[in-house]
Each structure stands twice: as structure tokens, then as C-alpha cells.
Amino acid sequence: MTQTFVQSADDVVAFLTAQHNLIKDMFDDVLSASSTKAREKAFVDLRQLLAVHETAEEMVVHPRVRHEVRGGDEIVDARLHEEHAAKEQLSKLESMDVDSKEFIDALTKFRDAVADHADHEENEEFNKLQRNLAADDLKRMEKAVQAAEALAPTRPHPGVESAKMNFAVGPFASMLDRARDAIGAALR
Ligand SMILES: [Fe+2]
Ligand SMILES: [Fe+2]
């Protein structure tokens, strides 16, 4: 099970916002690491957290935004586009030497893109879910996000941004039922 680093929060918005802040700190950990080993470890931790965080958003948050928020389709399509680009950047970073200037430059650019993506989610999705959904619904969504993160693949897979695709194809097919059960139970 992947360590998702954030303690249980009050609701889905608090949980994912805390994770956004943690992700930003983890970028700094990679950039400021004092040895190759420390930088590699910090990068693996960051990559894992990003992978499970984005998968959970794709399974739990974006589908709700499509249904509950006016103009939701357009908002979510833009977020999925950003998440797809992020996964591609992450796969490129994986093949670089963590001590190279190339890696530091690419990671710095990637950090800025991820921070912008997080701001867009907080301002265009989280705020609106908070406004449109009841408190207990937001609490149930937090449980669903935690269940999704516990089962999510820990490496990024560009091209599997839709909620259906992430769990319905390739190596994730076997997780499909478990994930649905866990998420369904959390949402009941
Ligand atoms: Fe996201
Ligand atoms: Fe996010």
C-alpha cells in the first residue's frame, strides 16, 4: 500500500489541499537534496504521491465536478489535459540523471506546472464542490479518495486519465473490482 503522507482530514477538500501543499514541499526536497541518493529517494516519493493523488482525483473528484458544477465538462477536460501533460513530463524526468542540469531544469519547470494545476483545481473544482455539496458528502468523498489512493498504481501512466481507463485496462484490470468495492463502500 502506498504511503499517502497526509493524515485523515475533515473532508475531501481539506485532504487534497493538504496533499497539494505536501507535493509542493516535496518538490523542494528533491531540488535541495544534498546527495544523489537523497535526491533519488525524494524524487521516488514525490512521483509516487503524484501518481496516487492524480489517480484519486481522476476517479473521485473530476467525475463529481462534471455532474455537480456548471460548465463541469469544460473544467474537467482542462484538468485532464494538464494531468496528461504532467505524466508525460514525469516519464521524461524518470529517464534523466538526477544530478544533471537537465533534470534540475526540467523538474523546476514541472514544479511550476504542477503548482498551477493545483491552483486550478482548488479555485475551479474544490471551491465549487464545497459550495454545492453537503458536508457529509464531502466527508464520504475523502474516504473514497483514500481508498482510491491505497489501490492506485504508483507510477504515472500517460493516457489513462479518464476514470474508466485508469482501472479498466492493462495492469490495473485486476484492481478494478477491489477498487470499486472500496470506493463504493466509502461512498455509501
Ligand atoms: Fe490533479
Ligand atoms: Fe490535485
Image: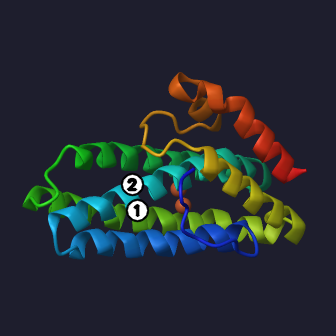
Q: Residue furthest left?
A: 101
**Residue designated by label 2:** 47
Q: Are marks 1 and 2 in contact (CB under 8 Å)?
A: no
Name the foreground residue: 38 vs 27: 38
Which numbered mark, 1 or 2, is in the foreground of this view? Answer: 2
Q: How many marks?
A: 2
**Residue designated by label 1:** 114
* Figure check: 14 above or below 78: below
Please tell me how crowded label 2 is: few (under 14), some (14-19), or many (20+) other residues with Cα within 10 Å.
many
Name the foreground residue: 147 vs 69: 147
Q: Quadrant of residue 45?
A: bottom left
For marks 1 and 2, the one nearer the N-term is: 2
| Residue 35: percent from left, percent from top | 16, 70
At label 2, which amino acid type do we have?
A: Arg
| Residue 187: percent from left, percent from top | 85, 51
| Residue 102: percent from left, percent from top | 11, 56
Would residue 79 be found to the left or right of residue 109 on screen? Answer: right
Residue at the image position 63 percent from the left and 38 percent from the top: 163
Residue at the image position 77 percent from the left and 46 percent from the top: 183
* Figure check: 170 above or below 6: above
